[in-house]
Image (spheres, rainbow, N blue to C red):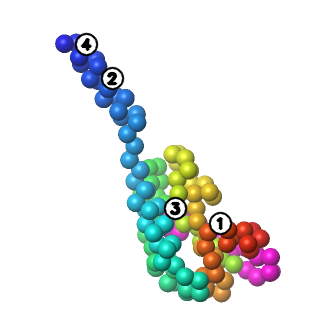
Amino acid sequence: MRHGWIVAITAALAACGTFYIDPAEPFREANKQNLAKLSVGMAKTTAMELMGTEPSRGVFMWIDNPHRSEWITGNDGKPYEVLYYYTDMKQRDDKITDDELTPLIFQDGRLVGWGKDALQRLGS
């Protein structure tokens, strides 16, 4: 009888170590699905409405949407605003890294492209 309890407890503890619920998964999936609704030339306000602006609860922190933003200067010398949305999880940790973000690129308040390839074409 005692052996049975030890086996049961060991199995239960092992299951806890492999079971993982990621509260940010629906958030990332929604961001990925919303990317398909974007179109070049769209106003920044419209793009942000489509992508959503509500933060989400992660495992260790709240995640802003967009996660971060920056201004860059393209190869053409023009300024671009880049909003980064959390769309992928490469590693289960408490960090969101650049390779887990999808950039949306705006010039003069209009969407000119999105994705890492579009950002690289600007020379950033």
**Marks 2/1: CA–CA distance:** 45 Å
Membership of 66 in magenta stretch? yes
Residue 53 in sight in this render: no
What amino acid is found at the position of numbered circle 2 in the picture? Thr
Q: Which residue has dot 2 on it? A: 10
Q: Earlier in the sequence, mark 1 or mark 4?
A: 4
Left or right of 84 on screen, residue 79: right
What amino acid is found at the position of numbered circle 1 in the picture? Lys
Q: Earlier in the sequence, mark 3 or mark 1?
A: 3
**Marks 3/4: CA–CA distance:** 46 Å
**Marks 3/1: CA–CA distance:** 12 Å
Q: Which residue has dot 1 on it? A: 116
**Marks 1/4: CA–CA distance:** 55 Å
Q: Nearer the viewer, mark 2 or mark 1?
A: 1
Q: Earlier in the sequence, mark 2 or mark 3?
A: 2
Q: Quadrant of residue 3?
A: top left
Q: Earlier in the sequence, mark 2 or mark 1?
A: 2
Quarter that holds the N terminus: top left
Range drawn in magenta: 64-79
Instruction: Say the numbered circle drawn on residue 3.
Output: 4
Q: Earlier in the sequence, mark 3 or mark 4?
A: 4
**Above-or-below relation of 44 to 16:** below
Left or right of 55 on screen, residue 68: right
Q: Residue at x 52, y 53 (%)?
A: 89
Residue 124 in sight in this render: yes
- Give SS at disc 3: loop
Q: Earlier in the sequence, mark 4 or mark 2?
A: 4
Instruction: Say the numbered circle drawn on residue 20.
Output: none
- Give SS at disc 1: helix
Q: Position of residue 99 (x, y in %)?
A: 62, 57
What amino acid is found at the position of numbered circle 4 in the picture? His
